[in-house]
Amino acid sequence: MHTLLLYALLAAEIPQAALTVRGTWVLDRKGEPVRPALWMRGLQTSGLAVSGGALVAIGDQRSNFPARLFTIALPPRGAEPPRETRLTEDPVEILPGPGLPEALRRRYESKPNPDFEDIAADPARPGVFFAVVEQDAMLLLEITRRDARGPAAITAIAEILAPDYAPWRADLNYRMEGLAVAGPGPEIIVAFERAEDSLPRLYKVVWKPGETSLPAVPLAVPFDTLTPREGKGLLNINALAYLKHGGAETLLLLARDHERLLVLDLATRAFTRIVDLDFRGPDMEKLVWTSPEGLAVDAEAGIAYMISDPDSERGNYRAGGAADAAGNYADLVPLLFAVPLDAILPGAGPPPGK
């Protein structure tokens, strides 16, 4: 049987939907774009979390502000997304705190611009985040910022021990990419972006204060049954978010190159919905390449947020039909997308009165 036909049969019973989402520019606190300088890529936002009535992202390896927290004002809700939102403050440097294991601290500090891949808030501890870093090792960091006007500190660090297999094309940048806090302990789900068989993986780790290595337990997820999306790249998972929907533990998985959201029932490990995303700019212009790499859910407000990581070396972060990137696209200004949860998961809107 032809491979594509087999995929289609296996995925035939998964409900699918299409969703057009309109972006909002993310500017600095003065309302100006953070323009690239030298080899840097502007803000280059990596990951996304909801915390303290705002959104929090983190500066990636080629950001003008690597290893900094970005606090982004929530766009006001209305019939149309606003054209822009701003950082609420200057980027906040993340500094190693006291008492970290010396060997792991040295590994983290081996690069002045760590390769941060995602950030997630700990729902049980306000002001505490987890972040995943790809260095020579895959590191999981606990970052604490209790005072909204204070510094951010790495208060714990551990290495993620994943099964021994190679990433796609032996490229170390295709390893751990996304994470979500999914239960007490806390239990953390991490995504291996794409392995040598061209498929992603999911793992569960249990965070234990004081531990320096955390075994990653594989979760059996049928990524091989998903149909390719015509005209898009290979399947990878770059961000994820956890929520409960209808009493079921649910993961939203952001497939960057497919430009899709995958809905996974954690108990059955079955995909229950596929949402094809049509990303648009603030003027509803189509985008050539969006590169969504951050995902966060505000379950109380009934909104999912996504943010782009426009590290575009080939000029493909641009409006459709344009020969070259111009304006904010040329400046690699990130786009933030706010989506009603019930457009992704029917019935997952905010509670009455919200």
Image (cartoon, helix red, strand yellow):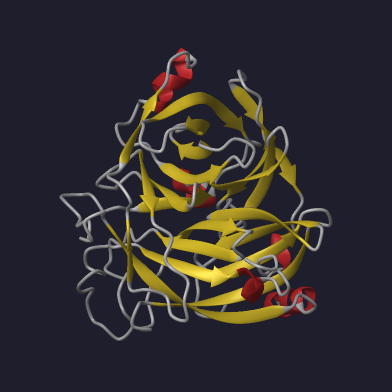
* Image quadrant in which the C terminus is located: bottom right
The residue drawn where x is 63% and y is 59% is 300
Report whether 75 appears left or right of 353. left
The residue drawn where x is 23% and y is 81% is 323
Above or below — where is 235 with respect to 277?
above
Above or below — where is 13 with respect to 268?
below
Residue 91: image location, x then y, percent: 30, 43
Above or below — where is 342 with respect to 30?
below
Report whether 48 appears left or right of 2. left
Q: Is residue 349 visible?
A: yes
Residue 292: image location, x then y, percent: 46, 63
Residue 85: image location, x then y, percent: 34, 63
Above or below — where is 197 with respect to 19?
above
Report whether 285 appears left or right of 136. left
Q: Is residue 227 visible?
A: no
The residue drawn where x is 22% and y is 63% is 331
The residue drawn where x is 49% and y is 63% is 306
Q: Quadrant of residue 254?
A: bottom right
